[in-house]
Image (cartoon, coloured by chain):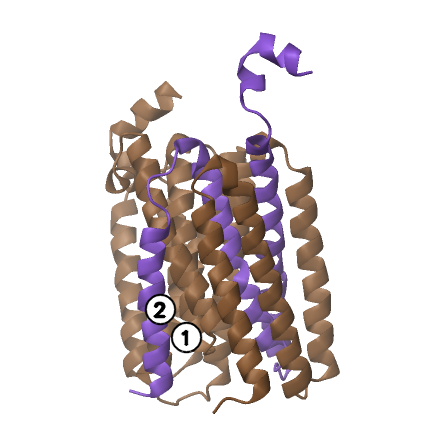
Chain colours: A purple, B brown
Amino acid sequence: MSQELYTNLAIFVLSLLVGFEVISKIPSTLHTPMMSGANAIHGVVVVGSILIALEAKGPLFDVIAFIAVVLGAINVAGGYVVTDRMLTMFSKPKRANTDAEKDGDAK
Amino acid sequence: MMSPLTTIVSLSYLVSAACYVIGLHMMRTPKTARNGNRLSAVGMLLAVIMTFIVVLVKHETSMTGWIIMLVGLVIGVAYGAVKARTVQMTDMPQLVSLFNAVGGGAAAAIGIYDYLTQPTGSHLALAFSLPVILDLLIGCVTFSGSLIATGKLSGKISGKPITFPGAKLLNGIVIIVMLASIVLTVGFPTAPWILIMTIVAGLVFGLLMAMPIGGADMPVVVSLLNAFTGLAVAMAGFVIDNQVLIIAGALVGAAGTILTLQMAAAMNRSVANILAGGFGTGDFGATAAD
């Protein structure tokens, strides 16, 4: 086993363990935003797409790399923007939505 | 010793990775969730910028390479951002599922690219063959599975569980083909037909996995496929030897699994029960309650 492989394997295993621990019990209202936020993070695949696009040689490889870049870019850009929009509803005072009287006072 | 450039880039990737972890952690509570997502986005921007710098300094990239990358980025970012900005709040779950599908597709494309760069008939080292086959299979499964989920959530495909006679048999055959493709990739010389077989098997398995799921259960399956994509991205990281892909992918793979379990628990269901889909009785109950 090479040193590089060992390092990558160690990083992989420890990142998995961090992933298991980093979100403990979360309220169910945050389930969808959390899923969307995690979805945006795996948009990091665009970094890999960029790297293969820049070394591509030959039409077939160009096409595959182009597809990889477009798909990765959609994932990363769309993922973060849609998560941010989802979370705008948490940045407003929550009571205003449920209590009509207080809603009136707030305005 | 690492060169100064490699040092700076590696340290920046480490900062990016820390941003993802802290950002995800901050998303546990409503108060800090939005800033958590933004921190994660800053980490992502840093990773992309550093990748650009590596390419600018190190590689002698062809004009075609730059055009492919820049045009691809512009198209992808524009489409993703516009879709995300204009989507109705109620349509967001299917958009997330679509973004998950393309992420899986990108990971699979990297796998296809790297498989094809190996000379035909060459024996692959285990350190390459195992991650590349897992990247291909998982990436293809999440690509087709998430697209079906998107269709079901948006109503383009019937939200009812779709089953047909012999579905279980076909499922069994596809699983055997997938296992065979792993054995062929790891133990035998490379050949284009192995690659094609792997891609087809992965895509069909994704279809068969998502089709029998009822609309009410779909969010749980989208979350599971999201975790799968994370793992596919981590495998792509092994294939191209890039640590930021491995860290972010593994993080999402694990956190996504925990999230899937919690989502299923919130519905008083088990993930296995949901995946059994149209065969289980619970699904009809859930649909009726909806």
* C-alpha distance separating marks 1 and 2: 9 Å
**Which chain contains the residue that carries disc 2?**
A
Q: Position of residue A2 (x, y in %)?
A: 33, 88
Quadrant location of residue B289? Answer: top left
- Regarding mark 1 in the picture, which secondary structure is present there? helix
Q: What residue sits 36% from the left and 56% below the top?
A: A19
Which kind of residue does numbered mark 2 sit on?
Phe
Direction from residue B96 to residue A7 in the image, left or right: left
What's the residue at 41%, 45% (across, down)? B223
Q: Which residue is mark 2?
A: A12
Q: Is residue B60 visible?
A: yes
Which numbered mark, 1 or 2, is in the foreground of this view? 2
Left-right relation of B74 to B114: right
Residue A103 or B242: which is nearer the viewer? A103
- Left/right of residue B45 with respect to residue B217 in the rendered view: right
Disc marking residue A57: none
Residue B189 at what x, y percent from top left? 35, 86
Quarter of the image that includes the C terminus of chain B: top left
Q: Amino acid at mark 1?
A: Phe
Provide the secondary structure element on which disc 2 rests.
helix
Res A60 seen here: no
The correct choice, above or below, for A9 with respect to B269 in the image is below
**Residue B238, labelled with which disc?**
1
Q: Is residue B287 above or below residue B167?
A: above
Q: From the viewer's perspective, is residue A70 above or below residue B79?
A: below
